[in-house]
Image (tube, rainbow, N blue to C red):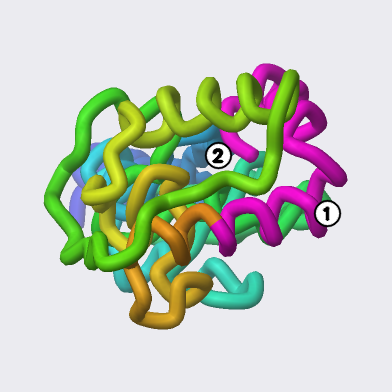
Amino acid sequence: MKKKNMIKSIATFAAVSAGVLFAGSQSASASTVKHTVVSGDTLNKLSAQYGVSVQDLAQANKIQDINKIYVGEVFTISDDGQISVSDQSAVAAAPAQAATTQVSAPVQQAAPVAQAPVQQSAPAASSVSGSDAAAKDWIAGRESGGNYGAQNGQYVGKYQLSASYLNGDYSAANQERVADNYVTSRHGSWSGAHSFWQSHGWY
């Protein structure tokens, strides 16, 4: 081989090698995006937004029920498909805050998505009065428009309670009783729940 051709071949080989090394260094540095969960987010929504599967998001979400996400969680999604979840200390485990893989969390739901079977055999009576009664009506208006038959995924009725709380009894009387018990145990009063709702968008 002539010396000139040998030098040309060595130069070509070096250029190709450098290109391979350069390409390798680029592929190794995957870019990432961080998404902090806000009220109304769902796994379906994140899946569509970032082009990853709902199943992969759920598998990375190791908090309590993998199919629920909570305000304050941070999803880190790499373009190579790696997903991690952090900032889990903000999880409050509140039923109205959780979002499922099917629908958005019931925040400021102005109109019902579907109608739940509501038994109206007994008249609905509230055990609160005064400012608590006004706060209770205000929350019901924001959650369901005051509709006992409203349903949004697993959340049912006038106060958008988890169906598991109602234990299969969707009657107006039971919705009132369970809502009063839930608010008393969590917020102390409907006035307290009202203040919390105004700050967080859920109660």
Q: What element carries label 2?
A: loop
**If you read the primary sequence from the N terminus, does the residue marked by circle 1 or circle 2 appear first?**
2
Q: Where is residue 139 in the image (x, y as percent from the top left)?
A: 53, 29
Q: Does the magenta stretch include residue 162?
A: no
Left or right position of 14 against 190: left
Judge by depth and name the residue closer to the eye, 182 or 89. Answer: 182
Does residue 197 show up magenta in the picture? yes
For the residue marked with disc 2, what is the amino acid? Val
Please rate how many residues cluster around mark 1, counting C-alpha atoms within 10 Å: few if below 14, some from 14 to 19, many from 20. Answer: few
Judge by depth and name the residue closer to the eye, 166 or 7.
166
Q: Mark 1 points at which residue?
A: 89
Task: Please state which of residues 44 and 203 is positioned toward the viewer in this rendering.
Answer: 203
Query: Residue 113 in the image: x percent, y percent?
Result: 16, 43
Res. 103 visible in picture: yes
Residue 163 against residue 130 in the figure, above or below: below
Query: Where is residue 166 shown, x and y percent of the image?
Result: 45, 72
- Which residue shows up at 46% across the image and 45% down it? 159
Q: Is residue 136 above or below residue 92?
A: above
Q: Is residue 123 above or below residue 35?
A: below
The amino acid pointed to by label 1 is Ser
Quadrant of the drawing holding the C terminus: top right
Closer-to-camera residue (178/199): 178
Q: Which contiguous range is marked in magenta?
A: 177-203
For the point 35% across and 32% down, which residue is it?
146
Q: Is residue 200 above or below residue 53?
A: above
The residue tagged 2 is 37
Q: Which residue is drawn at 20% across and 38% down?
A: 112
Evaluate whether residue 8 shows in this view: no
- Image quadrant holding the N terminus, namely bottom left
